[in-house]
């Protein structure tokens, strides 16, 4: 393929287009976060979303990484598909509390239901590269941490096939559970 036939977009406009496409194709997708109405916070990434999809699906929140993330986790558990905006990475540690708490609950429920012990946690995605994140998460949930990269192949037991189909084979989630067979 030649680059002449490829369309080029700025990074922020590519994100904006992808969000538009996801929200158009699935009514359960919504955007939630700080400053989603303001280009000062999110640049072009949320441009036109509020006008097209309304305030029920483009939710501008006050500053509260913990509450935003917790609301998104609850919505995801209920079957919605939240896109979370945290414009400042220096406050991301506050967003970890609900993620870690939910991971701990999921670990306990999985171990009870399938009589298998979860042995480690796999951190993937952009947040996995935060300095000190491995030690923080390991201390909070008392499990060893592995930092994944885009090329890491993750093997999983048959019981997780539905989850893999839902999330996609890339496991493009902030935290995945590693299970020892």
Image (cartoon, rainbow, N blue to C red):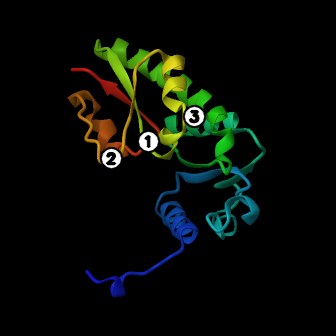
Q: Residue at x 33, y 27 (%)?
A: 178
For marks 3 and 2 on the same chain, the one whose residue lies earlier in the sequence: 3
Q: Nearer the viewer, mark 3 or mark 1?
A: 1
Are the two marked residues, 3 and 1, in contact with CB atoms closer than 8 angstroms? no
Residue at the (61%, 53%) spot, across then down:
31
Q: Position of residue 42 (x, y in %)?
A: 68, 60
Relative to 97, residue 50 above or below: below
Q: Is disc 2 in contact with disc 1, using a CB cutoff of under 8 Å?
A: no
Secondary structure at badge 3 equals helix
Of tags 3 and 2, the one toward the viewer is 2
Query: In the displayed image of the protein, which residue is found farthest to the right?
Result: 62
Q: Which residue is mark 3?
A: 74
Q: Percent x, y for residue 1?
A: 25, 80
Mark 1 sits on what residue? 173
- Residue position marked by numbered label 2 in the rendering: 170
Look at the numbered disc 1 and give the secondary structure of its residue: loop
């Amino acid at each position: 393929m030649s680059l002449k036939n490829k369309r080029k977009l700025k990074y922020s406009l590519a994100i904006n287009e992808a969000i538009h496409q996801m929200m158009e194709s699935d009514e359960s997708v919504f955007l939630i976060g700080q400053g989603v109405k303001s280009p000062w916070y999110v640049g072009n990434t949320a441009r036109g979303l509020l006008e097209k999809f309304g305030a029920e699906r483009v939710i501008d929140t006050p500053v509260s990484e913990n509450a935003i993330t917790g609301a998104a986790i609850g919505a995801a558990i209920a079957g919605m598909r939240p896109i979370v905006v945290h414009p400042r990475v220096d406050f991301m540690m506050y967003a970890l509390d609900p993620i870690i708490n939910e991971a701990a609950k999921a670990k306990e429920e999985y171990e009870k239901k399938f009589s298998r012990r979860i042995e480690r946690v796999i951190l993937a995605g952009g947040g996995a590269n935060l300095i000190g994140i491995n030690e923080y998460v390991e201390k909070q949930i008392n499990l060893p941490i592995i930092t994944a990269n885009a090329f890491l192949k993750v093997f999983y037991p048959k019981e997780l096939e539905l989850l893999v189909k839902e999330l996609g084979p890339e496991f493009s989630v902030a935290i995945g559970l590693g299970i020892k067979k």
